[in-house]
Image: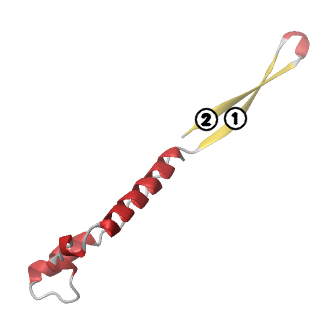
Amino acid sequence: MKNFAFGIAAAATIGLASLSAPASAATTAPAMTAHADTAGQITEFSSLMRRPIIRRGPVCTMKTIVKRGPHGRRIVNRVRVCR
């Protein structure tokens, strides 16, 4: 969760920095224009449009282990099991 918050803060900082730059410093990429004249520009534009890869973390559950202790008492342990 902390990494997610840092990512959002970094994105906001970069976005504000790009808005404060002068307009003359902005360059237009030929691949990002509305029309493409050559096949090279079309392939360059399609390489930018990749689908994001979703990586999910481990799935953890709590497993209950019941044992018999002295005088027949139940001893209950809860163990975290991740797969």
Q: Which residue is mark 2?
A: 81
Q: Secondary structure at mark 1?
A: strand
Query: Which quarter of the image is occupied by the C terminus?
Result: top right
Residue 76 in which image quadrant: top right
Evaluate if marks 1 and 2 touch, with contact meaning CB atoms under 8 Å apart.
yes
Q: Which of 3/21 is in front? A: 21
On residue 47, the disc is none
Q: Position of residue 32 (x, y in %)?
A: 22, 79
Residue at the image point whose x is 32% and y is 67% from the top: 20
Label 2's element? strand
Q: Is residue 53 left or right of residue 1?
A: left
> Mark number for residue 63?
1
Q: Position of residue 7 (x, y in %)?
A: 43, 53
* Residue located 17% across and 75% down the image: 29
* Residue under the image location 46 percent in, 49 percent down: 6
Would residue 1 be found to the left or right of residue 32 on screen? right
Residue type pointed to by label 2: Val
Image: 9 above or below 83 = below
Closer to the camera in the image, 17 or 64: 17
Measured as percent of width and height from the top left, residue 27 is found at 18, 74
